[in-house]
Amino acid sequence: MSKSMMKVLQLSGKSQTRVLIVLIASVVFACYMPTLNNGFVWDDDVNFTENFNYRGLSPSHLNWMFTTFHDANFHPLAWLTLGFDFVLWGMNPAGYHLTNLVLHVLNAVLFFFLIIEFLRLTSVVTTDIDMLGIKVSALIGALFFAIHPLRVETVSWISTRGDLLCGIFYLLTIIAYVRMSDKKSTIDRRKWFLLSMLFYMFSLLSRAWGITLPLVLLILDFYPLRRLAPGCRPRSSFKKLLIEKIPFALLALGGGVVAFLAKKGSMLNVPEHGVIDRFMQAAYGLCFYLYKTIVPIRLSPFYLLDKSFNPIEAKYIACALLVLCVTLVLIIMRRRWPWAITAWGCYAVIVSPLLGFVQSGPQIAADRYTYISCMPFGILVGAGILRMLILWRKESHLLFVWLSVVTAILTGLLFLTVNSSRQVRFWHDSRSLWNHVLQLNPDNYLAYYNRGVLNQDQGRLAEAIADYSLAVKLDPEYSEAYYNRGISRESQGDLTVAIVDYSEAIQLNPKYVEAYNNRGVLRKAKGDLAGAVTDFNTAIRLNPLSPEAYANRGVIRLSQNDLKRAVQDFTKALEVASGNWSHRVQIEQILGDVRARLDS
């Protein structure tokens, strides 16, 4: 045995825990430290670089954070941390990434303590193993969770801050709940119960992950907490457990309603994705995340949901049958393998809102959805390591067998670390991200579109047009791709073809206000004033709060010497425009000149 291991064994219990915490923090920080070199990517533009509302901690900023749905989310505590980031780092992405990394390290440490709590409670723990063995097992389980490549997306993407913060409060909720169940004193139980409720409320204000937590706590009541009192009627004991969950359920209901309202606009309608489709997609998701946990290769930032989703396709039927068989076997073996049915049940319940029953967005799955839902697998890893230690104590094994097992564990952790570090590089910038997605799936039309937007923003118009053209080739009904291709072609001076693209976008989406505005501007430039006015009138009818439409119509009326109605349009444009509207100063000057002409 090495001298360093001997020193750890000689330490007191608290000192051993501190050493293991430092080890976890060091490994996790080293694994994800390359994220500090990454920039803002993907939705970070909408959330941060183009969003001024979170930049500070003034009353107006706080009011926005706690009252606004932004990008189909409501997570005020996450915005609060991002406001602190802006105060500390400005718009330097390294600081935001550092906060993400620190939060992930905290989650890894809290998960370490949660595994210890569970291992203490399970039947696996006997006199054949001491607390150091439990802590070492928990260490490996926590590292398996924290350095797994499926965590890369959540840690590397600043827009997933809510998941990281929610994870902290989610874990604290369960730890407090377990401590409550372990107390005999009514006062102590009440204290831990209230603390658990407080943490749960904070988790919901960070992200809506916890809406299924009452069911998870109920599962844990059966195993490993075993809270059905011996000698009592199971019905009465179960009723007591249900009543205890009512406060959690009320918070979950509120969080669920808020999450539904926030995401309502991004959900697919049932006619587009039917009930059977959703159930088959859910079965696929359950198998997909389990498979990627075991075989973490070819991980993509964007797993596209095929618009021609066919629920009777072989892979979906196979997944549905596998889920059904696994569930039935675990139910039958629930008394012999209580740990297995608990892990499977918690996993399925936690991830259920993200499996497609309430489809939000065009993805069929996402690595970030595993951040909390796959924690049960980390607990199983810790329990498996502990079982091995117990068997080692009970039975005599050759030294090379023990060394082989230790080598296999370390090799597995090293593989996860190397794979995660490699995955982090794909999140360095948006171009690396979308190139990686397209390398894995050359038919991903959304990846072409997003890379096209990036090229367009960087002035690479020819490349942008090529990407948009590939996007509409793969999805001929993608109105946004036509619209953005029209913008790029307009920037190249090809107004006629740009009008064709805007018209195609309008045909696919008759409520496309921006396309009407842009087409109206180009029609005016080509001398078609009547057509331009028609487009601006339609834009105003669809969106009476569009300052561009009023201003553009005002310019035409001004050119026609219709000064009174031009004043009306310019005045309305300034009235409905935001305070930081980029054309405000220009329109104020024009309005002043027109009013002066009227007065004269």
Image (cartoon, helix red, strand yellow):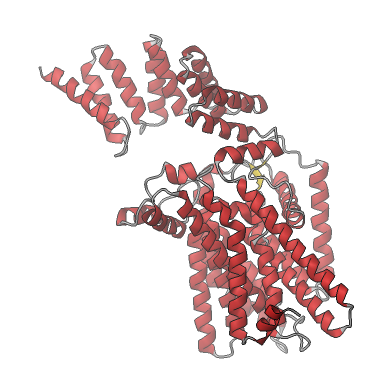
**Residue 383: in sight, yes or no?**
yes
Residue 332 sits above or below residue 88 on the image: below
Which of the 4 image quarters holds residue 588? top left
Q: Taking 247 as reference, is 585 left or right?
A: left
Give 19 or 448, whichever is nearer the viewer.
19
In the rendered view, tell whether residue 514 sits above or below residue 276.
Answer: above
Q: In which quarter of the image is the C terminus?
A: top left
The residue lying at 84 percent from left, 69 percent from top is: 404
Q: Where is residue 264 in the image (x, y as percent from the top left)?
A: 53, 46
Q: Which residue is drawn at 76% across and 62% down?
A: 411
Whole-percent x, y for residue 591 in the image: 21, 25
The residue sitting at 80% across, 65% down in the picture is 408
Residue that sits furthest to the front in the current view: 3
Q: In this view, does 126 lie to the left or right of 302?
A: right
Q: Nearer the viewer, residue 195 or 432?
A: 432
Please identify the quarter of the rendering in which residue 369 is found: bottom right
Q: Can residue 181 be seen in this view?
A: no
Number of marks: 0
Quadrant assignment for the N terminus = bottom right
Residue ID at (58%, 78%): 18
At which x and y percent is residue 174? 59, 73
Indicate the position of residue 419 as horizontal and vertical percent values: 70, 53
